[in-house]
Image (cartoon, rainbow, N blue to C red):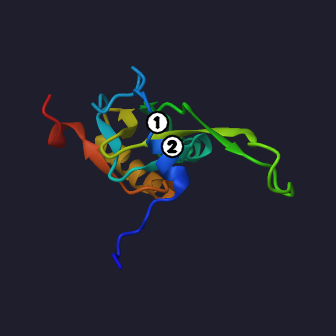
Amino acid sequence: MSSKRKASNVAIKLFRKVGYQKSFFLSNKPKGNVSIVALERGFLEKNTLESVRRVITRELSRSGKINIPVGFNTPFSAKPSGIRMGKGKGKIAKHIARISVGTVLLEIFTYNTLGASKALKKALHKLPIKTEIRHRDRFFND
């Protein structure tokens, strides 16, 4: 028996789409001073990223500009609770974002990089996937 965990069918179906191309506004090249970058693949919902944005806004006291370059373009269908099996596929419940390794989830444009990295550290606890904070002057060759 191999110890490797098998991905669920939902994860396989959503990541392996024929002819899927990333939208032009999705960019793996960060433009902000401080960014959150994904270290593993997974899914994100809008409300998760909204709660992260709120934490950062409160911590920075609205002194920086926050950019979220993630597109929520994958529909996720679900049946209502209490409904029996069968009778077709459920309605679209929400839209999710497929996140791959190295995707920039959030960027902050600010002069106070120390305060921004402190805010991002607090915000990382809200995300369901492994992420890291990257500073533009240290990690990116621009």
Looking at the rendered image, the quarter that the N terminus falls into is bottom left
Residue under circle 1? 17
- Check contact, mark 2 vs mark 1: CB within 8 A: yes
Q: In the picture, residue 74 is in which quadrant?
A: top right
Answer left or right for 84 relative to 61.
Answer: right
Q: Nearer the viewer, residue 142 or 121?
A: 142
Query: Label 2, label 1: how many angstroms apart (C-alpha)?
Result: 6 Å
Q: Is residue 81 visible?
A: yes
Looking at the rendered image, the quarter that the C terminus falls into is top left
Return the residue found at the far bottom.
Answer: 1
> Which element type, helix, strand or loop, lies under badge 2?
helix
Answer left or right for 84 relative to 138.
Answer: right
Residue under circle 2? 14
Q: Which of the numbered marks, if any, corresponds to residue 8?
A: none
Taking the spot 51% from the left edge, 39% from the top edge, the residue there is 97
- Image coordinates for residue 95, horizontal then vertical, percent: 61, 37
Q: Nearer the viewer, residue 23 or 129?
A: 23
Answer left or right for 85 relative to 36.
Answer: right
- Image coordinates for residue 15, horizontal then vertical, percent: 45, 43
- Image coordinates for residue 56, horizontal then vertical, percent: 48, 44
Q: Nearer the viewer, residue 125 or 96?
A: 96
Taking the spot 86% from the left edge, 58% from the top edge, the residue there is 82
Q: Residues within 10 Å of mark 2 (few under 14, many from 20)?
A: some
Q: Disc 2 marks which amino acid?
A: Leu
Establish if 130 lies above or below 14: below
Taking the spot 42% from the left edge, 27% from the top edge, the residue there is 19
Q: Nearer the viewer, residue 9 or 78?
A: 9
Q: In the picture, residue 31 is in which quadrant?
A: top left
Q: Is residue 60 visible?
A: no
Q: Residues within 10 Å of mark 1 (few under 14, many from 20)?
A: few
- Image coordinates for residue 73, horizontal then vertical, percent: 54, 30
